[in-house]
Image: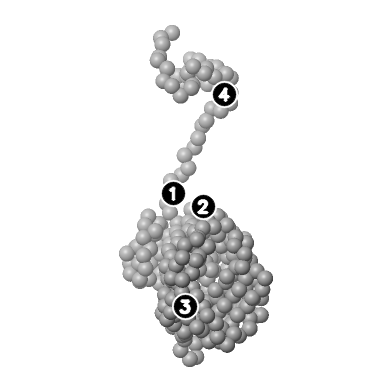
Amino acid sequence: MRITPELMTEANSVFLRSIFVPDVLNGASQNVAFSPVGVHFMVTMLKELISAPLYSDWDRLASHTNLIHLNKQLQTNPTITSKSVIAGREWSKSVPTDFLMDHFKVFNSVDVKSIGKYLEADVSELASATGATVHLLKFNGSWQTKFTGNQSVKFSDGIEYSFMKAIVPSVPWFENDDLTVVTLPFKIDEGFEDVCIDLILPKHEGRAVDLNEHKKWISNQIIQSKAKIVIPKVKLEYKEKINLSSDSAIESLQKIRVEWDENGVKGEAITMSMARSLPPPIPEFIASRQFLFIIRQEALWLFVGRISSIDASLNMGKRIAYQEL
């Protein structure tokens, strides 16, 4: 059974609202990348296998998602690799003994070296964690039409660069007053689902683009018999904490690597949630208003009093020499 298009649309919407839009707005000049399906996979693992408390939007999404079905959907294309792990003495016990899923492994402890070896990825952030869930997603796709040329382009930062160029046949194309969307396919063996990249170019610098409109853009594309596509080579790494659980002891993050050149695109997303043994909070007593005191020997009260005004000469951040009474 496949994950329905309606559920995928809801997952994307929750991701945009909860993670992507706030992050993009807070770092307008920074290159940003996430894996929405990596987050979707993670919240489903947390709910289905760990019973971790999730924020309401993520909880509703995970409640309607079958983890095994989502995992199978990520195993059906040779350009995509998906693996997952649950680790830790307590978290490993929470996985039902009859639970079986392809490319999934349970570790009794958070053995960073062993988990990294299984996933073939750097999971050093798990050091000191007592429990962990990890999802790895990799993509490796070759352009159907390679970029064989170059063109000088003055980017919005005012600098002129040499971008790569290709004349691409049969390009799905959407354009309105605000943006242009083109879709470029990757090579795929016959019998497998197509994978593509949508490139979205706003026409107005600095104006926000609502990615919730993506489905409408794609459904209204026309096919250009050929088009000149000029884009930069890209290589970016991005890591960000993400808030998925209301349990303050559970920390989640996602780290991304995406790069493309004349030949194709490579991407890797590692999504992690981990529990740490946190020291209990330190209780605080701050005498910020009038207070009482008792100096005593057992039940023998030596002094009792109330402090309702502060001696400024003693409390202005300078050491005052002690004077005998």
- The Cα–Cα distance between marks 2 and 3, rounded to whole angstroms, is 48 Å
Which residue matches tag 2? 248
- SS of the residue at dot 4? strand
- The Cα–Cα distance between marks 4 and 2, rounded to whole angstroms, is 33 Å
Question: Which callout, 3 or 1, points to the residue nearer the camera?
Answer: 3
Instruction: Check if mark 1's residue and mark 2's residue have beta carbons within 8 Å.
Output: yes
- SS of the residue at dot 1? loop
Residue depicted at 57% across the width and 71% down the height: 200
Question: How dense is the environment of label 4, judged by Cα within 10 Å: few (below 14), some, or many (20 and up)?
Answer: few
62 versus 274 height, above or below: below
- The Cα–Cα distance between marks 1 and 4, rounded to whole angstroms, is 32 Å
280 versus 119 height, above or below: above
Which residue matches tag 3? 165
148 versus 283 height, above or below: below
- The Cα–Cα distance between marks 3 and 1, rounded to whole angstroms, is 52 Å
Q: Position of residue 321 (x, y in %)?
A: 40, 15
Which residue matches tag 4? 291
Residue depicted at 43% across the width and 63% down the height: 237
Q: Quadrant of the N terminus?
A: bottom right
- SS of the residue at dot 2? loop
